Amino acid sequence: MDLRILNKDMYLLDGSFMSGVKPYVDIDNVIKHPLWGSNLLLNDEEAVVNGHKAYIKAGVEFLTTNTYQASIVGFKKYLDLSCEQSFELIKKSVTICRRAITESNSDRNIRIMGSVGPYGAWLCDGSEYNGNYIDTMDLKELYNWHKPRIQALIEAGVDIILFETIPSLGEAKFLLNILAEFPNQKACLSFSCKDDKHISHGETFASAIEEVWPNNSQKQLIAIGMNCLPSKYVTPLLLSVKTVNVNFIIYPNGGGVWDAVKKCWDDSQIQNISIDDIKLWSQKGLKIFGGCCRIDAIEIARFRKLLDTM
């Protein structure tokens, strides 16, 4: 892989795995499963392939594994697998992406991002949107939970590790310390944000960027940014950053706010992303752009058309 991976103006990332796979599964049952879409790696590989293919057809250049909530502990508990079988299932997510790319015969150079969600996603209680567990939990437990999932993706040959929806600076730095154990592996880091100034745990987005990017940008991080947030927050968050020469990755939600208790969406807040939004974000350093919750292949195809006009 060419490590100078961001050598053009902007790249298109895929959208929500759940939105992509929705036409091929009983989505209500998938959403209610404690592993969300990760259980489909074992239970419905064809649906996973079809979801990936839809995004490839839409024109993406980065395809994400459906491992956001995948973990050795989770697969053992909810899929009744051994440690070794769980490890291999996480690796299989990369193989499935490769299969989708091969079968799609795209003329684009599509690279694979290995999704690594926060510990809070495993708790299934919305903790990835506050990150408060980082203040009290045993860091050895956190290490043992994160390390094998990262290692599995790297052993499978993933192009980029994507630390996504990370709620706190503490967990972000912890993940980067694990990443340093694999010095040849490149990664992106994306925070979840609770408003137009702060990441979910309460640190300012600007301070988190300043803390992480200057120390890592020339080492392993190729981009840093935000995801799983209303698009209306993106511009003020970007404008708050004073750190220079930042490569940003941004993939907001398609609208609404997730209710972790009711497990449904509040659609009272919806904003469509325009070409003017993308142009402004590009001026501030946006390099990788895509979608998170409720962004499907149709919307990613619209983003592709917008990017192609720039």
Image: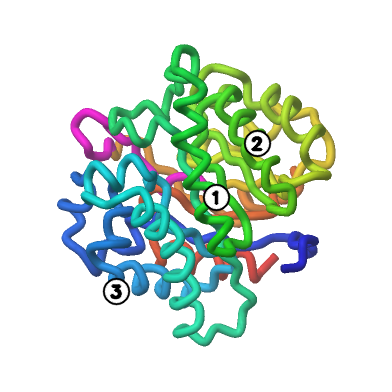
Q: What secondary structure is marked by label 1?
A: helix
* Residue 28 coordinates in the image, percent (x, y): 17, 51
Is residue 280 in view?
no
Q: Position of residue 253 (x, y in %)?
A: 44, 45
User: Is residue 256 visible in this depiction of the protein?
Assistant: yes
* Residue kind at label 1, given as amino acid type: Gln
List the residue tagged with mark 1.
151
Q: Amino acid at mark 2?
A: Leu
**Of pointers 2 and 3, the one earlier in the residue sequence:** 3
Mark nearer the N terminus (2 vs 1): 1
In the displayed structure, 183 sits above or below 61; it is above
Label 2 residue SS: helix
Circle 2 residue: 176
**Percent of width and height locating residue 308:** 64, 71
Q: Nearer the viewer, residue 97 or 256?
A: 97
Residue 46 is tagged as 3
